[in-house]
Image: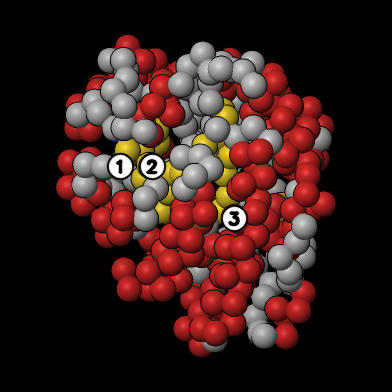
Amino acid sequence: MNALKNDLLLRALRGEKTERTPVWMMRQAGRYLPDYIKLREKYSFFERCMKSELATEITVMPVHQVGVDAAIIFSDILVVPQAMGLEVQLIEKTGPVLPDPIRTIEDMKRVCVPDVNDKLGYVFDALRMTKQALDGAVPLIGFAGAPWTLLCYMVQGRGSKTFDGAKQFCYQQPAVAHQLLQMITDTTIIYLKEQVKAGADLVQIFDSWGGMLSPEDFEIFSLQYMRQIVAAMKDVCPTILFAKGAWFALEEMAATGAHGLGIDWCIKPELARQFAGPNVTLQGNFDPAKLLAPIPEIEKAVKNMLKSFGGHRHIANLGHGILPNVPVDHAKAFVETVKAY
Ligand SMILES: Cc1c2[nH]c(c1CCC(=O)O)Cc1[nH]c(c(CCC(=O)O)c1C)Cc1[nH]c(c(CCC(=O)O)c1C)Cc1[nH]c(c(C)c1CCC(=O)O)C2
């Protein structure tokens, strides 16, 4: 086991004082990096995930090229629905497509809680190989989609502005929806624990579509399942919950015992802190599109953001994934401004 040379992120999550604010960017592995785009031409998305040498190469790219304080394993949240039995395709310009989504109780026969070592062993191989390649430079983040966000894709069958098909399923067939959410939760807990055994130092749960639910439905269809995941990981590693748009539930999410909460750019850091209380680390919340502004504007906005968070229990990050059209210099300016502050 290597001792970490840079453990700022882990210390910030434990609430310890740090010499400076740690920084990483959601979706930092891939998308905008020219070396990644070259690999895209040669290998399909799932080849990039499943070949551990490729996943390792992509995971460490932003550590070396952009200087972030953590690596996040190159994979996708949709490997879980795939392991549970559904076909998942990634189609250029359309995004993920699940050709046979779940719509009825009958469809539930096609999904199961899988043997994760059998179905997702390639993720654990990639984590082990990445851990070695990093040689303790920075912590390695494992991740999974939140049960609600995975249900969105498993039911809707593709991305959507409203996920109304997924919501209709939940509102019309709540018992089936809860059966599915529980299966996803059970799979996710085993999957995350194995990620930690393979080398992840902490994990993040991505509830990208949590904020599409009303506060009441967020508790029913999302939070009660994330709470189970946080509880199961309690003695395993620190957990960050990122529920995009779900600012209304920061108090309840803090009460889960998660070490960190991700926030997007639609809430002021001061207000997020009021809602979340003092005992959790906040992560965020730079508008990803603001990285398209001229570099001096980025620097100014990053400094304002850091000031608003107050320098304690904060992890600098974007409020959602980095956009594919962000110039690498601009991503670097973001990271360097945080480091120099
Ligand atoms: C909703 C969601 C997905 N995947 C993910 C989320 C949650 C975070 C968020 O909301 O952005 C999470 C994710 N997806 C990917 C990572 C790996 C690590 C990283 O990029 O830092 C992570 C952490 C790789 C990927 N996953 C995907 C790509 C693009 C495919 C490619 O580069 O060929 C990558 C790099 C494909 C994917 N996968 C998904 C979508 C909507 C798409 C299509 C378009 C896109 O968002 O890039 C589902």
The answer to whether marks 3 and 2 mark residues whose Cβ atoms lie closer than 8 Å is: no
Horizontal and vertical percent position of residue 104: 66, 84
Amino acid type, label 3: Ile
Q: Secondary structure at mark 3?
A: helix
The answer to whether marks 3 and 1 mark residues whose Cβ atoms lie closer than 8 Å is: no
Horizontal and vertical percent position of residue 44: 79, 41
Q: Is mark 1 within 8 Å of ligand 1?
A: no
Q: Residue at x 30, y 42 (%)?
A: 280
Is residue 42 at all visible to an observer of this figure? Answer: yes
Horizontal and vertical percent position of residue 15: 31, 32
Q: Which residue is mark 2?
A: 259
Q: Secondary structure at mark 1?
A: loop
Q: Residue at x 44, y 44 (%)?
A: 240
The answer to whether marks 1 and 2 mark residues whose Cβ atoms lie closer than 8 Å is: yes
Amino acid type, label 1: Val
Horizontal and vertical percent position of residue 22: 39, 24
- Cα distance, mark 3 to mark 2? 17 Å
With respect to residue 62, does 315 lie above or below?
below
